[in-house]
Structure formats: C-alpha cells, structure tokens
Image (cartoon, rainbow, N blue to C red):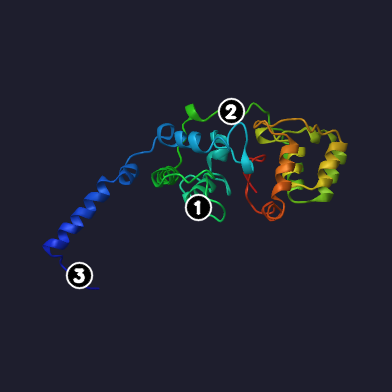
Amino acid sequence: MSIRVLGNGARYVAIAIAAFAVCSPFADRAATAIDFAKDIQPILRERCVECHGPAQQMNGLRLDRRRDVLPNRVGANGAPVVPGNSAASRVYQRISGTRAGRQMPPTGPLSAEQINIIKAWIDGGAEWPDDVAGPKSTTTVNVGFTPIANAIRDSDRRRFAKLLRTRPGIVSARGNSGWTALMYAGAYGRAGDVRALLSKGADPNLQNDNGATALMYAVDDWRRRGHFSTARQSRTFDPAMGEPR
C-alpha cells in the first residue's frame, strides 16, 4: 500500500468535503438522538396512517400504535420495524423501495430526508415513548387460542378437527389484539376451516382491536390469492399471536 501526501489544493478540497459532511442535516440527525414524537410520528400521521391506521389496515399493517409496529418490542421476524436493523424492517423496505413491489406511499415517495430520518430512528433502536404509544388493547388473551391458531396456520387438519371436537369453546377464544379463530381462518386458513368454525358457533360479526371482522380478512386474502399462499407458509410476524412464526 502506498501513501501519498496531499498538496495544498487537494487538502483544501478534503477540508471542504469534511465540512459539508459535518454541517449537513443528515449528519446532524445521526449525531443527535431522534425524537419520535417530533421527527417520526408526524411523518407517519401525514403520509401513512390514512391507509395504515384505525380506519383501515391495508395488508394487515397498522402504524399508529406501538404494539402493532413493535410487537413485543423485540423485533420479531417480519415485524414492521426491527429495532436496530432498518434493512430487516418492512416499513423501511417499502418506503425506500429496497424491497420488490411498489414503493410506498402510493401517492408518492417520502423525501430523501424523511426516509433517512426513519432509517436512522430504526437503526438507533426505534425508541417509541409510552406517552405516545397509542391505545392499549383491552382484550384478555385466551391461552386456548394458540393451539387452534397454530393448527390453522400449519394446515394441520387433524389437529384442527380434534380441537373443535374436544374443545368447542375454543371458537370464542381471543388472541392478541382481539383476534378470533374465525378471523385467523379468514386470513390464513381455507374455506373448510371457516365453514367448520361457523358450524361450531363462531361469530362472524365480532371485531378485533382494529375494528376488523373475519370477513374483512377473508376478502383481503382472496384479493391477494396467488402470492399469499406462499407467504402464509413463511415464518413471518403474526399479529394474532404476537410472536414470530
């Protein structure tokens, strides 16, 4: 390796580049802790929450509540935001266009500065203070939900039938965010699962914490049919389970 001493002109250029880097807004953001309430939440509210908020959760994504964006706050696989790892975070993948598919938001991409602020926030640990975390779930999670949810997700017909036969009350069990087995079947299962649950008394009109019913998830799955059948088998974050699958 050779080392060359810079002349005066080259030194001036190097100093100017260094000064620009230090004075740029991106350097300031990196050097200063990002304030979620001031820097991140306004972007989400202005550009994201209309499609991913209380009124609707397109593709099952809700961005106005911490518990939906940061499941268990441990960065489960497939979670919208994985603290410390923007590259693995679905939110950053979509707003930056680094993942296959249309860059979000559909009305036009965020500015370069906004994308970099969100990236820096995620890579810095994705701090989301309690006082702006959004409403908490009031639903009591029933441990009986997990077995039937797993059976539906894994397409385990034998275990699914056994659970319905031996534990009929399981059709009313609630998972995280108020999900029911019928909602789960609508999103991840098959038509036969839905029919079986309805025959056991599952209520199709129940709503989860997002205000969604089983029919909404079933319709959304039908619209995405063709690529969702593969996605449902992947180990992605499950909103009803609150953990990676």
The extreme left residue here reads: 8
Q: Are marks 2 and 1 in contact (CB under 8 Å)?
A: no
Q: Residues within 10 Å of mark 1 (few under 14, many from 20)?
A: few
x%, y% of residue 88?
Answer: 51, 51
x%, y% of residue 47?
Answer: 50, 38
Q: Which residue is mark 1?
A: 97
x%, y% of residue 218?
Answer: 74, 42
The CA span between labels 2 and 1 is 31 Å
Q: Which residue is mark 3?
A: 3
Give amino acid for label 3: Ile
Q: Which residue is mark 2?
A: 136
Q: Residues within 10 Å of mark 2 (few under 14, many from 20)?
A: few
**Mark 2 or 1: the one toward you:** 1
Lower position in the chain sequence, tag 2 or tag 1 = 1
Element under disc 1:
loop
| Residue 166, label in figure | none
Q: Is residue 52 above or below residue 100?
A: above
Q: Is residue 101 visible?
A: yes
The CA span between labels 3 and 1 is 39 Å
Please give left or right for residue 165 compared with residue 211 in the image.
right
Element under disc 3:
loop
The CA span between labels 2 and 3 is 60 Å
**Mark 3 or 1: the one toward you:** 1
Q: Is residue 225 above or below residue 163?
A: below
Lower position in the chain sequence, tag 2 or tag 3 = 3
Q: Is residue 87 above or below residue 65?
A: below
